[in-house]
Image: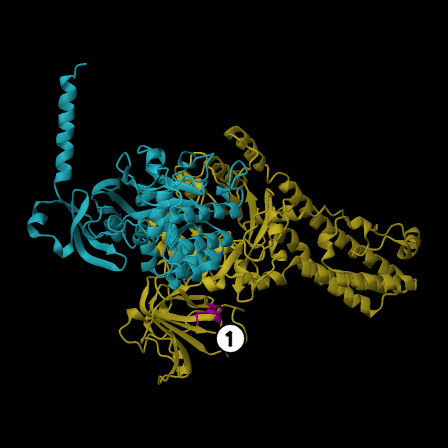
Amino acid sequence: MQSLRSRIVPALLATWMLSASGPNAQEPSAEKPNAQPERSESGNESSPSPQQEPRRGRRRAGARRRGLMVIEAGVVPPVSGPPIEDGVVVIRGERILAVGRQGELQLPPNTEVLQFPEGHVYPGLVDASTDAFTDAGLQKDGSLNGGSAISEALVWTGDRDDMLTEHGVTTAYINVRSSAQLRGQGAVVRPMRGGFELWEDREQAALQLRMAVGSGAQHPLQRQAQLTATGKLFDGLEEYRDGLEKFEKDLEKYNEEFEKYLDHHRKKSGKADKKPEEGEAKAAEEPKPSSESPPAEGRRRGRGPGGRRRPGGGGRDERAADPDTDRAAMEQTLATLLALLANEAEDAAGSQGSLRSSAPVARIEQDPAPQSKPPQGKPPQGKPPQGKESKDDKKKSDGPKRPKYPKKPRNDPQKDALAKVIDGAIPLRIEAHRVEELRAALRLQRDNDVPQIVLEQAYAAGLVADEIAEQGATVVLTNVMPNALGDAGDKRNPFAKFDLTKLPKQLEDAGVPFAIASGRARLASVLPLMGAAAVGGGISAEAALRAMTLTPAEILGVAEDTGSLTREKYADVLVTNGPLFASDTRVLLVLSKGRKEFERQ
Amino acid sequence: MQTSPTCTVAAALLAALATPALAQDLLVKAGRVVVAPGTTLENSALLVRDGKIAYVGKDIPAEARARARTVDLGDHTVSAGFVLAATTLDADADLGEGALAFTPDLRVAEAFDAWGKRLEHLAPHGVTSFGLTPSPRNVAGGIGILAKPGKDRGRVAEADAFVGFSLVRAARSQERDPTSLMGARAMLREAFDAARTGAEVGPDLAVLRQVMSGARRAVVYADTFAELNAALALGAQFNFAPVIIGGSEASKVVDKLAERSAGVVLGTMSPTNRIADLELPGKLAAAGVPFCFAGQPAQMRVSAALAVRHGLPREAAHAALTRTPATMLGRQAEVGSLRQGCSADFVVFDGDLLDLSARHVATWVDGVHVHGQSHSHSSKHSKASR
């Protein structure tokens, strides 16, 4: 089926790369297949070119050295644009270089060309909800809370449940299904043959909330009571954040005062040599930007123009400006200063100084009771310096008073996660089945100004689709199969009346963005059938494909890198021997970041 | 007692209305007519007369074509209706004798409720005929029937069809014999032996003799490896090819099933099944074992689509919904295909019914529209216009 051959075409790679004068070179949108040579008459002109600014820090050093890979196929639906007949996808390294029509792109010699004359080339599927790589025990653990991050507990066991790539899934969101109300934070992963990798910056991709009432409630009133309880989810968050902010401010003030205190004593003692002064200068310069930024940063962190945190791009800068890092530098400086000061007194003080400088920086965030533990960058209140200082104090009672280290509020990972939700850094994913649960979820969003919510297992979403659309919520659909919730005639089953294959159409009509997901890892092989069932329920095949690629990528916040066959995105490619939604279609080839993860022999 | 004139008039009117509808031929035109698995006629038609297929495609005489009432299904695809090979329609209690395990001469037809609620769940899912079996609770339950759903009531198409045996756990009871699989096997073996030698006579043994002579099909409920082996051994010893119902461990005896020409009636397949279960139909097809999809009527098509997704060829999947189950019940001349002389039982889809993207448009039984759109093809048009 797939023949691998090399082509000799006169144009060299270099010329090709430089010919930026094609009509498509002005194509501005990244969401359209950038190389659209079908518009032009002459193939020679229309070769794709790096007309767009290469994204900063995106391309790995080795990528350029890796050769080109070209996939030719009968049909190429790039999702970001209309399907291309006799299409070609050019991949360089781990990114897509061009998408266009065969014969209109000039390929350099010695290019690896994979040909699938009858095949279809799709973007790798994005499964917006799966339980792959997770442990059953963990999924049942009701003691998890919003602070738990499932990314820390993912395992690869190699059984059927972890075989996502062979069904074409190249990106997946790992759901937390624990019975806790705030279930934890799910992760975006890239499944691979023999493992997976966490999506950088999306390790904590969403906070999971269970709003579906359990078996405890028998009738709507009881359910209402349970839902009212979830309305208190964000209670106390403001106070917590105020507390943290106050601490940051206090810390800043403390640093300033301590600086004055040190200055005063250095002048008094008159023994300070060159070195401490250098350190002093450093200390004076460096903490300032950080001392201004942490509180503000903590609030606004990652709030991009769209209220969504942008992966990549700003990621690095953000990390550079991370308050932790700056605080670390400041601590180091302080510690050095202290060590030098203490030098003149006892040697015991010296040893403490070195101990402080090696104290792990992260502890400043995690230590629940800083008062009880000295190695925090706060001045030792213990014995050795005290003797000296008390002497000083007696001598110079007019000098500044030694400041007190502010009390740090108790750290609460769950509140931190909720804060991220309120800031729009991650969405709140709410499992809600019934109409009243869905309305409660929407109310929760309204009342607390939650920027993004994603509804899961929203069986009754068709009945409140307009309300969902109004609030800009998105829906991740699972079980999109005929009679998935039971026989429609079964009166004992309250959900049997919901035909989930019709739900995509209802959401589409209301304008709600939706993804079609497997929900369970072992259903990955059935994902295309779910898409087909959605088509049977009334949406177009293009819409169903989008619901398994670009829309979930957007919901997961990774649409800049995957979800469509678009230039500069990762080369996540699924090649099948026929239309994806035909039952007898087989997966022929799966590429993830340009690497072959599955190939049918 | 006096008959009111109104009643008489009403009855006459009813008769007048009902008779012509049946008498007039019906020409069903469609974009594709799947006469049998693998045989598809493009832009063709069926001529239905008295509830049966009178002519197919080019064979339709021009004169008959002109006189018939025409139902134009547009671009849709017409296929034979699904045959549900084995079901009890959740009426196990009425289809099995509690105190006796060996009742091969009891008749399911006598307990058939033509107005049963469960009958309403067949046509909406494309099922146009079904084998109603005795309950699997009895080792030899009785004589099953071929029945059909209808517009408002069902009917028995063949009252004296197959005989049902059972070796599954449900057939063993601590209340009566047999209490074990050994006992169940012995019970059947001894009965067949007695029937063969002619040492005993009676209506029950007469049924067994029909099985041995090939005059009557035997269906056997069996799931585990041991039960399947028992069913196959019984067939080998007494010279009949059993139709296995259930067969959840059939993958372990595929070769033996092929050797004994036994068929398998598979239960509902769910997407969450083990991968080996989902691949079983493909394996059976490759080994040449006849099999069909049964279980929940609502899931028959999904089962077939899942099997196709996991390796079963389309044609085999289509056969497993229509022709194979008809053959298993020995009724292939009446149901399961759209050949001349078969019942005009058909389903209408707006695509290949094995793709879940295709929508079920309508179901017709005996030339009568019982579910869905009667003769509209608007949905296809709306789909195309999008």
Question: Is residue A171 visible in this depiction of the protein?
Answer: yes
Query: What segment is highlighted magenta in the picture?
Result: A591-601
Q: Is residue A594 magenta?
A: yes
* The quarter of the displayed image where residue A290 is located: bottom right
Q: Is residue A475 visible?
A: no
Mark 1 is on which residue type?
A: Ala
Residue receiving disc 1: A63
Residue sitting at the far top: B1
Nearest to the observer: residue A390 or residue B149: B149
Vertical arrangement, residue A290 with respect to residue B64, above or below: below
In the rendered structure, the answer to whether residue B271 lies left or right of residue A347 reads: left
Q: Quadrant of the N terminus of chain B?
A: top left
Q: Which chain is yellow?
A: A
Q: Secondary structure at mark 1?
A: loop
Q: Is residue A320 positioned above or below A70 on the image?
A: above
Nearer to me, B126 or A288: B126
**Which chain can be seen in cyan?**
B
